[in-house]
Image (spheres, helix red, strand yellow):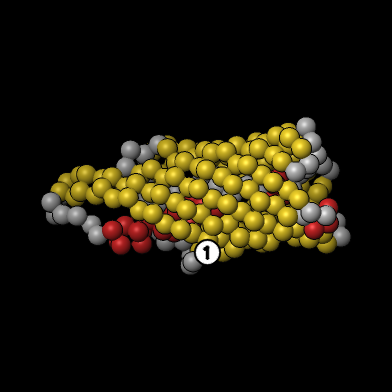
Amino acid sequence: MFNIPSYKIRNNIRPVLSVMASQHELPATAALFNSARKMVFSAEVYSVYNMYDSEEYGIYIPSLWAGFVASPNLSLFVQMGSGKMQDDNITTFGPVLNFIWGQEAKETVLNIAINHLKGPDHFRVKDISMSLLKKVNLGDNRFVYGISPHYMNAKVKIKDRDIVGERNINKTINETIYHYRAGFYRNINAIDLGVELNLSKNTLITKFNLVFII
């Protein structure tokens, strides 16, 4: 029986955690809606550049959002994503509390989220995050920039046997990930379309999202 050092596990899953963290971030254009008593819905997909390619921990999960705007300064959202991790069906989910303040042309957004990954028996993640964003109007377009720190707790538990011997992994990895965010958004026929860039260590994530209200 042999154990794999924690630093090797950390190096393997850090890029995956960065992508998961990005999935858990409420799209800025959804966070900016402040029409009270309205429902907000959003869908988001993404692409990843320079992502560490790990068969064991490879993951891809589009995200869906639903929210209720309680007042011009407060809204509550729920995130859910589903996808495949190897042969496992996995789900991420969690609530987001969103605050807005400032002048209409230069609003500031602060939101706090707690997300979980469920599904595979060998891999569980909890992500506690905060996003601080600033909006600037550019004609009919909106530019949003900010930062999102994520405090992630990942539990990896694997026990199997191969020709080398028995492999036993039972590790808890705590990782802090910072995402620097910038996005452009435009309203077309009551639907907001946007593209956002997330930059973290060795990873650039491009996200495409749409938002509509009812």
Describe the element under mark 1 as helix, strand or loop. Answer: strand
Image point 50% across, 48% down: which residue?
Answer: 128
Left or right? Give the position of 79 relative to 84.
right
Q: Which residue is mark 1?
A: 200
Q: Position of residue 107 (x, y in %)?
A: 77, 55
Left or right? Give the position of 208 relative to 103.
left
Image point 66% across, 44% down: which residue?
Answer: 98
- Residue found at the far right of this picture: 139
- Residue found at the far bottom of this picture: 202
Quick check: can you spot residue 147? yes
Q: Position of residue 18 (x, y in %)?
A: 48, 56
Total tally of numbered discs in the picture: 1
Amino acid beneath label 1: Ser
Q: Quadrant of residue 86?
A: top left
Q: Position of residue 84 (x, y in %)?
A: 44, 41
In-front residue for pair 15/88: 15
In the rendered view, would you say 106 is above or below 32?
below
In the rendered view, would you say 35 is above or below 182?
above
Left or right? Give the position of 60 relative to 161.
right
Left or right? Give the position of 159 relative to 188.
left
Image point 15% across, 54% down: which residue?
Answer: 2
Say which quadrant the C terminus sits in.
top right
Image point 73% across, 55% down: which residue?
Answer: 108
Quick check: can you spot residue 40? no
In-front residue for pair 55/31: 31
Question: Label 1 crowding class (10 Å Cα cut-off): few <14, some 14-19, many 20+?
Answer: some
